[in-house]
Image: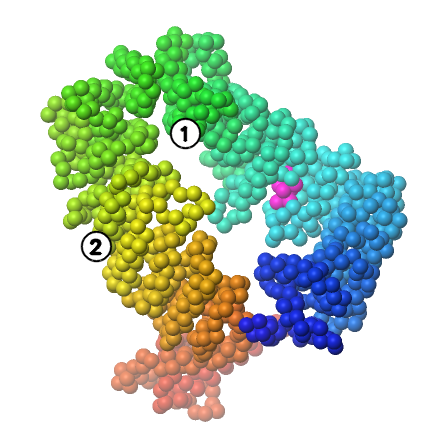
Amino acid sequence: IVAVMQTNMGELEDSTVRPKVTDAKGILKQNRQFLDYFWDIAKPEREIRLKAIEDLIEHLKQSEKPDELKYSLKRLVDGLSHTREDARSGYSVALAQLLSVFEEISLKSTLDSVKEKHNLQKAKKKLIRNAAFGNFFGVLALSQSTRLHKEPQVMLECVQLLQSLSRYREHLRDLPRKTMVDILSETSKEVFEEVLLSALQSDLTSALNTPEQLELLLVAMQKFPSALKPKKLKKLLGTTAVITKENMPKLVEVLKTAARSVKKDNILPPVAFDLVQASLREDNFEMFWNEAIIKGMLSEMPGPTHYLGFRLLGASLPLLSVPELEFVLSGDVMRYYGQHMLSAQLAYRFKFAPEMEKYVSEFMQGCPDADKQLVVALGFTQLTNQGYPVVPSSGKVLEHMDLCALQQYVEWLMKAFCKPQLEKCLDFSTRRQKGNQESEVESDGCVARFRKWIVQRLSFIVENHQIKKEEGLVMKMARFIFFHAFFDVKKPTPEIPETVQALSVPIDQQTRATISSAFYSLLQGLNSMAALGDSPEAERLNSRRVLGVKADGSMWIYCVVQYATTLLNQSKRVQSVQTLSPEQRQGWDSMLESVEALRKKAKKSSSPEHTAFQHLFLLVGIQMFKAPDESLELLNDLRTCVEKAQAKKSKKKKEPHWVEVVVEILLSLLSQPSRLIRSVCKAVFSRICPHLTQEALSSILNVLDPNKDEDESGVMVTDEKEKEKKRKRKEEDKQDDEENVKRRISKMIVIENGMSSETSQQEQDFLRRAADIFRNRLCRAKYYCRETDGREAELHEMLDRLIGRAQKLTDWSVSLYYFSAALYVLKVLRGVVSEQDSLRLMGKVDVERVTTCFKNALTSFLTKRKSPLTGAMFIDLFSRFPVLCVNMLDTAVENITAGVREHQQGQACLMVLRALQSKDVKNLMSDAQGTELHQKVVDQLTKSFEDVQSKNKTVREKIVKVLELCQHLVRSVHNQKMPVNLELLQKVLKSINSEGSLQKPGQLEDMYWSVMKLFYILKPKLEKVKKVVEAEQTEETTKKKKKKGFLPETKKRKNRKKPTVLEGKETPETPEGASGEKKKNKKRKQQGGEGTQNQPATKKAKTQQQQNKKKQKKGGQQEADGK
C-alpha cells in the first residue's frame, strides 16, 4: 500500500521539484521506515504531519547516524519549495525542530543551503513562485528554531533575505514583513542597535508608505524606545512623532490599504491596533480618533473601512481610561455602528454584531475596574434609534459584569425608566426614517420605546442565571417591575421606595401591558432560580436541587405576594391600576390565610406536599392583578378541591399519596379552557414531577383513554349541572387539553400500553404531536427510576411488548413513541454504572434477550417494504447503547446489499457509518475485530457498486449514502494503516465513471470525486472544445425544429400580386399599404416557407429586396451626414 501511495503521489507532484535521493553507501535502503517519515510530513492531514515530525526527531536521536542526519537536513531544505502549501508547512516545521534539537547543525550553513537550493536568480520562470516560498519558509524555520537570536549575523542575513522577498508580493503577500516583526520581537536591544537598525534603515524611512513597513516601525518603537527617540524619528520621518497633523493623510491611506487587505479575513489589521497604542503613548489619541477614524475611515462608503473602525473600537476598549471610553462611546463611530446594526437585519447583509459582542465580553471579563465596565455598558445602552436601544436587551455581556457595576447599572436603568433623558442618548435615524415623515416618532413615543427596552433588560438580568447577583438586587428589580405594571403613585412614601421617584411622563396603556407581560415572565424565572449566594444554607439547597427559594427557604413568589399585600394595604399612598372589588379582595385575603396555614404545617413537618399546595395557591393568587374575575373563580374552585380531597383522604382507610391529590386537582382545573389555568398547572407540574407515583401516572393516562368515563379523570367541584357544563368544555378542547397534560409528564417510572390495541385516528394524531415532547423530556431525562429490584422480568416483558407494538403500527411518529419508551425501559434496566466500565456493563439487562429483540426489529425494518420503524430509531439505539450496536452491526452490514429496497440499503449504510464513527464502538472492539469488520464492509460496498445505474432519485440517494460510508472507510483504513484490501473497491469505483458520466456538478458527483481523491485520482478538467460541439448540436436541433408545423399546399395563401422575380433583376418596391402587411406576417411566412422547394425565386427576391432597402437607408444616411 505504501508503494502504491508513493507512486500515485509521485504522479501528482512536479518531477522537477521532487529531489533526487543519492545513497551511494546504501544506508537508506536498509531502513524503509525512515523514508516514510518524509512522505508523511508532506501529507495534507495535520495530525499525520506532526506525528511524522515527532517520530523523525526521535529516530534521529536514537540512531546517531551522521549520514541520516545529513540526508534529513538536505531532504527538508529541498521540500521547502513543495507545490502544496501543507507540504511546505510540514517541511518548515520539521526543519525548525531539527535545528532546535541538533545544535551542532550550523544556522549559517543551513541558510546558505536554502539560498543555493532555491536561488531566485537561476530559477526558471515557472518555478519562481516555488523558489520564493522556499526562501521564505527557510527563514521561517530558522526564526522558529529559537537559536536565531544567538547568531546576529545570521539574523541580519535573514532580514536582508526577507527584504528582498518583498518584491514577490503577488505570491507571498505580507508574510515576509510579518516574519520580520516576529524576529524583531525576539531581538535584544544591543543586537537591534548594532546589527539590524542599519539594515532596516530603508524600511523605516518609508514607513508611511505601506502597512507592513509602518507596522515594522511601530513594533520597533514599542520594543526599542531608546533606539528610536524623537531625534531619530525626525531623521526617518521628518517628524518627532508618528501621530501628527502632517502625517495624518498618509496614515489614513495606510489604514485604508490595510482595511481592504483583510476584507475577506474579517480581522483587525495589526498596524491599526499598533497605531492606537502609539497615539496613547504620544498623548494624541483624540486627534488620531477624530482625524484618522472618523474623518478618514468613516468618510468612505460602508464597507471594509467602516468595519476597521468598529473593530478598532472594540479592540481598544481595554486600553482606554474612563474619559477616553466616554469619548469614543459617544462619537460618530458608535452612531455608524448603530446604523449598521439596523441595516444588517436583512438576511444577506454582513452582520458585525457578533464580533462586537465578543469584543465587549472579553473586555468585561478581563477588566477589574467597575467604573470602566459601567461606562461601557451605559455607552451601548444609550445608542438608540428613535428612543429604542439597538443592542438586544438579552445581551450576554452582562454575565461577566462586576457585582458593584451591575448594581449601579440597575440603578441607572430604574432612574432612566422614571425620568428618561433621551437628549443624553446617542440617538439617530436612518435615511429611510428621515425621508419618511410618517415614521417619525414623537417624544412620548420615544419614551415608551425606551421604557419597554429597560423593562425587558431588567427582566433578563433576573432570568439569566449566569449573571452574578444578590437576593436584595433581584427583589428590588422584581418589586420595581411589579409596581409599575399594576400600580400608580398617589403620594410618595419612604416605606415604598418605588414611589419616591416620580414619573416625568405617565405610563401609557400599551407600555403597561408590556410591563405586565414582563413581570409574569420574570416570575417564571424566579420559580426556576437556584438559591443565590455562597452561604451554607444556599449550598445545601442547591445540593438538593431546590429551586424558586431564597437562602432562608422562603419562596420568591411568596415574597412578591407579601409585597403586593403591602401595596394593597397602602391605598392612600398607591392605587391599583385595576381596582379590586370587595369580593376579589376577600378572595385575596382568603388565599393568604390558606398559604399561612400551609406554612405552619410545613414548619412542623417538612413535606413537598405543603410546598406544592402553597405554590399552587400563590400562583393562582398573583394572577389576580391580571385577570381578577377568573383568578377569583379559580381560587374558589381550588379551595373546594383541596377541602374535598382532604375529606376524601379522611374517609379512606389507606390515605392516598399527596401527589395523587395534587394531580387530581390539576386535572380537574385543566378541564377549563383557560390559558391562565394551564400556565399555573404547568408550573406546578414541573415541581411535582420528581414525586410522581404509579397511581398518579395512571390517573393522567386515564384522561387520555377515550374508553374511560370523563367524570373519573379528576375531583369534581360542583353539582351535576356544573359537571355537565365542564364536560362539554372538556369535549371541545379535549385535543388541546391532552397535549397540555402530556407536556407535564417529564418523569415516568414505567410505561404501559396507554391506549387500546385498535387506536383511533384522534389518538394517533395526538401521539404524533406528543412523541417529540415525550422523547425529549422523558426518555432523555437525567433523573429517572433506579429501583428495579424484583421487577427485572416484568420490565423485560414490557420491553418486548413495546418493541412488538412499535412494529405493528402504521404511523412512524406513533411508533417512535413506543420505541422511545423501550429505550427508556432499557435505560432503567441498565441503571447507574461507573464511567470507567460504562461501555461494557449493562446492569440488569439480559443482553442476549434484548439483542435478539432489537435485531429482529432491525431485520423487519430492512427486509419489509412497509415498516413504521425508521433508521433514526436504530441510530439512536446505537449511540446510547454501544454494546447492542456491536452485537447488531453484522445485521446492518449484511443489509447493505440485502435490503428490500434502495431506501433500506441506504439506511443500512447510514447505520454502519454512524457505528464506525462512534468512539465507544471502536473501544469495545479489538483491533482484529475492527479489521475484520472493515473488510466485511468493504466487500459489501464493492458488491453494492456492481451494475449500479443512477437513473432515478431513490437510487441516487442510496449511492450518496454508500459513497459517504466508503469515504469514511477508506480514510480510516489509510489513517490507521489497517491490513484491508481496497483494490477491488477502487476498480469498481473506477468502472462507475468509465463513460465519463460523473463529471457534472452535483451532490452525487462531488461525493464520488471526494472518494476517488482518497485513492489519489483527481477529477479531470473539462475541455473547452466541448462548447463548440454543443453549439453545433444546438444549430442542428434548431434547424430540425424549424421543419415542424408546415401547412399543406392546399391551405397556403397564394399571393397573386407578387411578381415573378428573375435571377439578376431587382424587385420593384411594394406599395406603402402592403409593406405593413408584409412586415406583420414576415416571421410567419419565413417559418412557413423555408422548407418549400417550389418557391425559391420568391425567397431570394425577399432577401434581395431587404438588402436593397438597407443599402438605400445607408446611402441616405451618408448623404445626410455629408450635408
Judge whether 7 appears above or below 357 on screen: below
Residue 545's tag is: 1
Q: Which stretch did the figure color magenta? A: 306-313
What is the quadrant of residue 992 in the picture? bottom left
Q: Secondary structure at mark 1?
A: loop
Q: Is residue 1020 above or below residue 558?
A: below
> Is 1026 located above or below residue 941 in the figure?
below
Q: In the image, is 677 to the left or to the right of 911? A: left
Q: Which residue is mark 2?
A: 808
Q: Position of residue 356 (x, y in %)?
A: 58, 40
Q: From the viewer's perspective, is 1102 left or right of 851?
A: right
Using the image as rendered, state which of residue 949 and residue 1052 is in the foreground.
Answer: 949
Residue 697 in magenta stretch: no
Q: Position of residue 360 (x, y in %)?
A: 59, 36
Query: Residue 746 falls in which quadrant of the image?
Result: top left
The crowd level at tag 2 (other Cα within 10 Å; few <14, some 14-19, many 20+) is few
**Vertical position of residue 715 compared to residue 275: above or below:** above
Hey, what amino acid is under mark 2?
Answer: Lys
